Amino acid sequence: MVCPVRIVESTDEMIHFEVRSESRPDEIHDVYFDIDHGYYCSCENYHFRKVECKHMRAVKEYMNQLNQLMQMGKTFQEINNERKEAKI
């Protein structure tokens, strides 16, 4: 199963994502990508182990998919609308 990912906020230096938990669907984890510091996740696994967690991997996969679709000529708005229609 893939963890659903949503972009919450984006600036020139940081992107904030929300990633729904696989094991606890009512729980959402905050993943941040910072230009200077890389990825950070609010989950317990990352907090204690300081290694890439499944939420970070979900964000990276999401960004790869976004990049591929944009290379095919789709706009971010079109991609976002398709995700809403599919309820991802």
Image (cartoon, grey):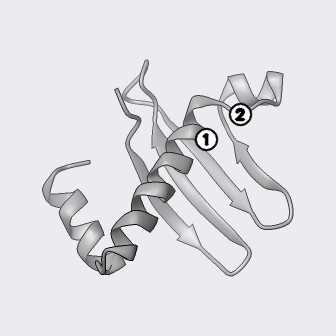
Q: In the picture, which quadrant includes the N terminus?
A: top left
Other-residue count near label 2 (Cα within 10 Å), few / some / many at <14 / 14–19 / ≥20 = few
Callout 2 amino acid: Glu
Q: Nearer the viewer, residue 20 or 38?
A: 38
| Residue 79 horizontal/vertical position (percent) | 28, 69
Above or below, comparing residue 9 to residue 28 in the picture = below
- The extreme right residue here reads 36
Q: Real-space Cα distance between discs 2 and 1?
A: 6 Å
Q: Is residue 35 left or right of residue 82?
A: right
Which residue is at a point 41% across and 35% down the rendered structure image? Answer: 3
Which residue is at a point 67% across and 54% down the rendered structure image? Answer: 32
- The extreme front residue here reads 72
- SS at mark 2? loop
List the residue tagged with mark 1. 56
Q: Is residue 40 left or right of residue 65?
A: right
Mark 2–mark 1 CB contact (< 8 Å):
yes
Q: Is residue 34 left or right of residue 28?
A: right
Above or below, comparing residue 18 to residue 13 in the picture = above
Which residue is at a point 81% across and 22% down the rendered structure image? Answer: 48
Above or below, comparing residue 36 to residue 54 in the picture = below
Q: Is residue 9 left or right of residue 27?
A: right
Other-residue count near label 1 (Cα within 10 Å), few / some / many at <14 / 14–19 / ≥20 = many
Q: How many marks?
A: 2
| Residue 73 horizontal/vertical position (percent) | 30, 81
Above or below, comparing residue 37 to residue 10 in the picture = above
List the residue tagged with mark 2. 52
Callout 1 amino acid: Met
| Residue 41 horizontal/vertical position (percent) | 68, 41
